[in-house]
Image (tube, rainbow, N blue to C red):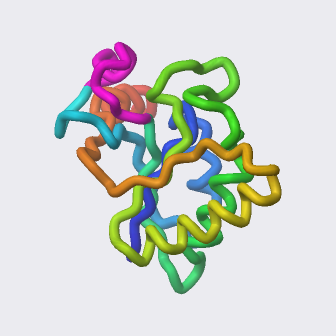
Amino acid sequence: MEIAVLALGCFWGPEIKFSEIDGIIKTEVGYCGGNNKTATYKEVCTGNTNHAEVVKLDYDEKIISYEKILNIFFEIHDPTTLNSQGPDFGTQYRSEIFYLNDIQKEKAEKVYEEVNKKLSGKVVTKISLLKNYCPAEEYHQMYLKKKR
């Protein structure tokens, strides 16, 4: 089992899209890249925590590769808009790949270069070491209540 953590705007739509892909075992929404180890939605929305909304993916590399996940990442959001996706604006909606190790970093840089070339150098996606990931607990609890 491998893990990918990706920021591509509001986390709900991407979580649904990724959950439908063969090889994605589990999805989780959360926040990453911020100054603190924990954060709430309200805190993240202030823009002061430096967290991005992310989708954490547990995947089976025998079924889907990290590179394929990154290509899907670039297909399902606009990597050329800075700190926004659709109607959502703010640093928490930035495009960012959070890598867990040097292998993921190398693969992310390679896919980034390929996509950036196709998009005439307009990609603003960041590639960063995973830092301060925390699940969006308040949303998980809300989701569970709705399912009951």
Q: Is 48 part of what is drawn in magenta?
A: yes
Q: Is residue 20 above or below residue 8?
A: below
Identify which residue, 127 or 136, lies in the foreground: 127
Q: Position of residue 130 (x, y in %)?
A: 32, 54
Residue furthest to the front in view is: 121
Identify which residue, 104 or 21, lies in the foreground: 104
Q: Which residues are magenta?
A: 40-52
Q: Position of residue 103 (x, y in %)?
A: 42, 77
Image quadrant where one finds the N terminus: bottom left
Identify which residue, 144 or 111, lies in the foreground: 111
Residue under the image location 67 percent in, 32 percent down = 81
How many tags in the picture? 0
Q: Position of residue 147 (x, y in %)?
A: 44, 33
Judged left or right of residue 135, residue 3 is right
Residue furthest to the bottom in view is: 62
Q: Is 124 part of what is drawn in magenta?
A: no
Residue under the image location 64 percent in, 67 percent down = 111
Judged left or right of residue 11, residue 129 is left
Image quadrant where one finds the C terminus: top left
Judged left or right of residue 113, residue 30 is left
Q: Is residue 119 above or below residue 21?
A: above
Q: Position of residue 132 (x, y in %)?
A: 24, 45
Residue under the image location 60 percent in, 26 percent down = 84
Residue furthest to the left in view is: 37
